[in-house]
Structure formats: structure tokens, C-alpha cells
């Protein structure tokens, strides 16, 4: 084997083209879109074309530079496909297509001798193309014939539809003529019937009006006669009723005078009863409020006792805490610090004593008012009328007048309001009865 034959057969371009072809084939099977599969198929075909050209080239006419460039571009395309598979960058795939274009161009520059067998192959290929074109043309003519038949059928159906439409239009026109004639006939019949009913109604109305006029005339005559009779009887009855009313009014005036005198006596008794009940109710209200004040005072006294006990306990605790057994004395700082714990109890005891004293004063005042109200009735019975009325007026101004400044400082305001409301409620119940 000569040096030129070894240079072509042992060159590394064969391995590079084989790697490029296998890589394009494997990635083409994994492609997701038709466009990507088409690009991989082009790369595979280009590698196959370069291999076929190398197999057919004349070793003595193959320049080493073309073989080296062909290998470098095949390796670059292989590297671009490998980078695209790992990164997914579409630019790498486009770059591989660019290198494949160079591979095809370089492979085309290789010197491949043309033989008689190649020319026969070209002739066979041309004959095959001619036969395919003829068959395709025949198929197109058959399709065109089918289209012509369908167009003819469509035209026939269109003509039939037009004829049917014309028939339907004629039938509609006939039905419309018959309908117009029927409507005209119905309108004529309705007009005749309406005119007949109008004439009958007019005749009946005249008869009814004449009968009503005669009946109305008879009623007016009968009413005039009845009115004259009733007027005479009414005047007689009215005179008789007037005489009876005068007599009854005199009797009722006498009875009313006697009833008024009796009611005046009852009114005086009712006033006395109401006054007694009101005084009793107010005294009861003051008694209830006094009992409430007594309970409150007792509660505050117990608070005072508890506070003083707590102060005593705090003092004992302070004394025990301040003792110094080793020194034999008291730590005054500790004693007063612990004794300060009882200061809130001292303040609470002082406040509770003040509240208890206020409730006790209110209780004594309420007990006094209760006794005065309870003995007021017997006291007033021995006095003259004018003096009794004056004392009652003073009591009203005392118990039902606006509150003074001194009274607002204690619970006496709530006591008077409660007692007044209770007395007014008793008065309302008596008046309702």
C-alpha cells in the first residue's frame, strides 16, 4: 500500500465522522419537536455524505489540508452537539449546523472519479422521477374528475332547491290569498253583528229609560205624601218629648245636688285616708332605708375590726422580725420597715370608720323622720283646720322640694326619692280604685 493510500485510509477524519453521525442519530431519537428532528437528520446525512465521498475519492488526488479541515469541523460539530445536550442552549445546535455546512462543502471538494455505472444510475434515477411524476399527474387528474363530479352534483342539488323554493313560494302566495279573503269575510260579518247589537241596545235603552222615568215619578209622589205625614207626626212627638225632658231634667238636678253633697263627704274621707296611707308608706320607706344604713354601718364596723386585727398582726410580725437574739435588742430599721406593711390596713381602717360613722348618722336621722311621720296623723287631728293645712304644706315642701347642698353630701337624697316614689305609687293605686 502506497503512502498516499495510507494517508487517506488511516486518517482520523473517519472516526470523527462516525462519532458525529452516531451522536446525531441518538439525539435525533430524543428530539421533542419535528424541527429539531429534521436538523439532526440533516447532520446525520451530511456525515454519511462525507464518509461516502471519502470512500469513493482517489487517494492520490486527496489533499491532506482538506482532510484535516474536514476532521476539525466534524469534531467541532460533535462538540457543539454534546454541549447542547448538557446545557440545552439552542445556539450550540445552530453552531453545529454551521460546522456541518463546512463539512459538506469540504467533502464536495474531494476528487471522486465518475464511472459508466454512475451515469447509468443517473439515468435510472431520472426514469424513476419521470414515472413518479406521471403517476402523480394521473392521481391529480383522478382527483380533478372527482371534484368535477361533486360540483355537478352540487349544481343539481342547487337547482332542485331553487325549484322547491319556487313551489313553496307559490303555495305561500295561495295560502296568503285565502287568508286575506277569510279575514275580509270575518271583518264584514263582525261589522254587521256589531251594527245589529248597537241597534238592539239603543231600542232596549229607550224602553228602560221610559220605565225608569215612570217609576221615578211614582216614587217622588209617594215620597211627598210620606214626608208630609212624617213631618206632622214628628212635630207632635217632639213637643211631647220636650215636656218629658223638662220634667226629667228637674228631677235629675235635684238628685245631682244630693249626690254632690254625698260625694263631697266621701272626698274628705278619701283625702284623710290617702294622707294616712301616704304617711304610712313614707314612714315604711324611711324604715327600710334606715335598716339598710344600719346593715352598711355594721359591715364597715367589721371592716374596721378586721383592719385593726391586720395592723396588730403586722406589728407583731415587725416585732418578731426586728428582734436580734444575739445583740439583745431591736433593729428599729427592720421594725419600721416591717411595720410599714400595716400602713394600708391603717388607712383602710380610717376610711371604714368614716363610712360607718356616716351610715350611723344617716340611720339616726331616718329613724327620727320615721317616728315623726308615724305620729303625724294623731298630732294633726287635735289642731285647727288652717294650722293643719299649714303644717301639711311645710311637710310637702320638705319631702318633695329640690335637694339642698347639705342633703347631696349624704345618702338622704336617695332615701327621699325612694320614699316619695313609694308614696306617689300608693296615691295612684288609690285614685285608680
Image (cartoon, rainbow, N blue to C red):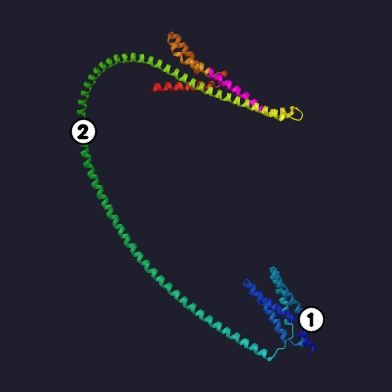
Principal SS element in the magenta part?
Answer: helix
Q: Circle 1: is it few (<14), some (14-19), or many (20+) Cα within 10 Å?
A: few
Q: Does the magenta stretch include residue 428?
A: no
Instruction: Report how many numbered discs are placed on residues in the image.
Output: 2
> Which quarter of the figure is the C terminus placed in?
top left
Residue 3 in the image: above or below residue 397: below
Q: Distance between the residues labelled 1 and 2?
A: 147 Å
Q: Mark 1 points at which residue?
A: 65
Residue at left offset 46%, top offset 16%:
374
Question: What percent of the width, then of the height, locates residue 262?
Answer: 33, 14
Residue 278 in the image: above or below residue 108: above
Q: Which of marks 1 and 2 is nearer the N terminus?
A: 1
Question: What percent of the width, then of the height, locates residue 316?
Answer: 67, 27
Residue 117 quadrant:
bottom right
Q: Circle 2: is it few (<14), some (14-19), or many (20+) Cα within 10 Å?
A: few
**Residue 105 at least partly seen:** no
Q: Return the mark for residue 307.
A: none
Residue at left offset 45%, top offset 21%:
424
Q: Which residue lies furthest to the right in this view?
A: 3
Residue at left offset 33%, top offset 62%:
177
Q: Return the mark for residue 219.
A: 2
Please, what secondary structure does the residue beneath circle 1 have? helix
Q: In this view, does 161 lie to the left or right of 363?
A: left
Residue 152 in the image: above or below residue 323: below
> Which quarter of the figure is the N terminus placed in?
bottom right
Q: Is residue 73 left or right of residue 129?
A: right
**Residue 6 at least partly seen:** yes
Question: What percent of the width, then of the height, locates residue 416?
Answer: 51, 20
Q: Residue furthest top?
A: 384
- The residue segment tinted magenta is 342-364
Amino acid at each position: 500500500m502506497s503512502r498516499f493510500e495510507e494517508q487517506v485510509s488511516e486518517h482520523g477524519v473517519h472516526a470523527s465522522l462516525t462519532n458525529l453521525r452516531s451522536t446525531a442519530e441518538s439525539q435525533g431519537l430524543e428530539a421533542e419537536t419535528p424541527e429539531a428532528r429534521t436538523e439532526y437528520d440533516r447532520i446525520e446525512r451530511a456525515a454519511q455524505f462525507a464518509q461516502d465521498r471519502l470512500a469513493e475519492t482517489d487517494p492520490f488526488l486527496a489533499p491532506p489540508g482538506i482532510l484535516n479541515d474536514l476532521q476539525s469541523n466534524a469534531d467541532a460539530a460533535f462538540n457543539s452537539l454534546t454541549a447542547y445536550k448538557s446545557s440545552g442552549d439552542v445556539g450550540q445546535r445552530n453552531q453545529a449546523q454551521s460546522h456541518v455546512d463546512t463539512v459538506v462543502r469540504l467533502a464536495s471538494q474531494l476528487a471522486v472519479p465518475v464511472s459508466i455505472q454512475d451515469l447509468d444510475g443517473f439515468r435510472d434515477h431520472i426514469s424513476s422521477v419521470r414515472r413518479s411524476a406521471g403517476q402523480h399527474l394521473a392521481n391529480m387528474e383522478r382527483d380533478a374528475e372527482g371534484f368535477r363530479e361533486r360540483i355537478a352534483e352540487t349544481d343539481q342539488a342547487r337547482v332542485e332547491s331553487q325549484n322547491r323554493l319556487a313551489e313553496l313560494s307559490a303555495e305561500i302566495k295561495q295560502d296568503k290569498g285565502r287568508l286575506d279573503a277569510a279575514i275580509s269575510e270575518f271583518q264584514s260579518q263582525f261589522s254587521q253583528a256589531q251594527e245589529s247589537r248597537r241597534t238592539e241596545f239603543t231600542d232596549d235603552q229607550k224602553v228602560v229609560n221610559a220605565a225608569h222615568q215612570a217609576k221615578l215619578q211614582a216614587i217622588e209622589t209617594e215620597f211627598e205624601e210620606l214626608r208630609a205625614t212624617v213631618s206632622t207626626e214628628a212635630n207632635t212627638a217632639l213637643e211631647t218629648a220636650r215636656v218629658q225632658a223638662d220634667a226629667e231634667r228637674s228631677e235629675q238636678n235635684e238628685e245631682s245636688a244630693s249626690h254632690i253633697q254625698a260625694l263631697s263627704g266621701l272626698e274628705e274621707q278619701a283625702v284623710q285616708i290617702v294622707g294616712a296611707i301616704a304617711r304610712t308608706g313614707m314612714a315604711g320607706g324611711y324604715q327600710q332605708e334606715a335598716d339598710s344604713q344600719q346593715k352598711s354601718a355594721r359591715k364597715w364596723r367589721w371592716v374596721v375590726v378586721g383592719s385593726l386585727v391586720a395592723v396588730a398582726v403586722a406589728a407583731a410580725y415587725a416585732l418578731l422580725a426586728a428582734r436580734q437574739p444575739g445583740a439583745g435588742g431591736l433593729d428599729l430599721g427592720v421594725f419600721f420597715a416591717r411595720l410599714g406593711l400595716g400602713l394600708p390596713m391603717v388607712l383602710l381602717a380610717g376610711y371604714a370608720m368614716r363610712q360607718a360613722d356616716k351610715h350611723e348618722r344617716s340611720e339616726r336621722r331616718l329613724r327620727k323622720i320615721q317616728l315623726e311621720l308615724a305620729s303625724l296623723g294623731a298630732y294633726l287631728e287635735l289642731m285647727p283646720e288652717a294650722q293643719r293645712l299649714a303644717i301639711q304644706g311645710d311637710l310637702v315642701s320638705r319631702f318633695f322640694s329640690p335637694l339642698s347642698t347639705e342633703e347631696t353630701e349624704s345618702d338622704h337624697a336617695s332615701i327621699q326619692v325612694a320614699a316619695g316614689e313609694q308614696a306617689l305609687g300608693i296615691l295612684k293605686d288609690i285614685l285608680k280604685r
